Image (cartoon, rainbow, N blue to C red):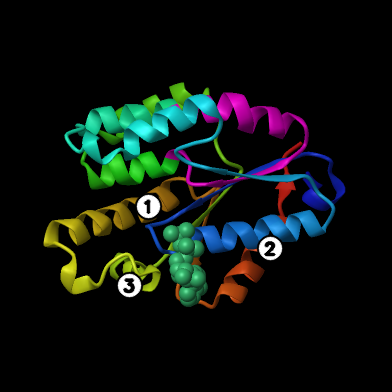
Amino acid sequence: MIKMYTSNKGLFISFEGVDGCGKSTQVKLLRDKIGSEGRKVELVREPGGLKISEEIRKILLNPENSAMNFETEALLMTASRAQLTEEVIRPLLVKGFFVIADRFSDSTLAYQGGGRKLDLNILKKINSFATKNLVPDITFLIDIKPEDAMMRSGLASTDRIEGAGIDLQKDVQKTYLSLAKEFSNRFIILDGYDSISSIHSIIWDKIINYSYED
Ligand code: ADP
């Protein structure tokens, strides 16, 4: 076992949670903190990355593609992730970078599995295929009720959300919590109602106490 502090190795960290839970806030704080310690660090965001992933992102986000079926959505998300993993994440990890992902494979399980009701076991296989089994070392799940997350980020007010919309988000949240139990070796659940600075302190504490199995 070697501690993160005394190692030259990189670390792959992912952040998960419903939209508006505070992921990008924490991702940036962690990036700045790791950078201020003189370590190499890079942020990646899904779907996207370099050229091919960005092209896939355009298809996924284009409002004209609203007829996209759930299987297509799942395959495009994982296709984008496959490219991002091979082109960006793996090479950085090899160079000893800390790579922080604002969403990774667990998002597919939570949204396309829990939300869209696609078969979780099939999605797990597609994820493994896409990432060639790359799994984050640590996954931070920011736990907050979806309706509060939406209110907070100004995405919508609760009375304007269709019943089905909020139900889907609740299913996503439930799936995240069961994934955290299933993969308790790498998941850390954070209370999304804590202050930004106390969540950041807990994250930093987990990072500096991380030990590599050697
Ligand atoms: P996400 O990336 O998960 O969609 P953001 O980081 O963009 O979420 O946060 C959504 C909004 O909530 C932002 O306005 C942010 O400043 C605010 N926010 C983030 N974390 C907290 C927190 N712990 N407490 C209160 N507000 C927060």
**Disc 1 packing (10 Å; few <14; some 14–19; many ≥20):** many
For the point 54% across and 30% down, the residue is 84
The one of 68 and 199 positioned closer to us in this rendering: 68
Q: Amino acid at mark 2?
A: Trp
Dot label at residue 204? 2
Tell me the element at label 1: helix
Spatial CA distance of label 1 from label 2 is: 22 Å
Tell me the element at label 2: helix
Q: Which residue is mark 3?
A: 151
- In the rendered structure, the answer to whether residue 211 lies left or right of residue 82 reads right
Magenta range: 80-105
For the point 51% across and 77% down, the residue is 194
For the point 73% across and 48% down, the residue is 211
Position in image of residue 109 (x %, y %): 35, 41
Q: Which residue is mark 1?
A: 176
The quadrant in which residue 136 appears is top right
Spatial CA distance of label 3 from label 1 is: 20 Å
Q: Amino acid at mark 3?
A: Met
**Disc 2 packing (10 Å; few <14; some 14–19; many ≥20):** some
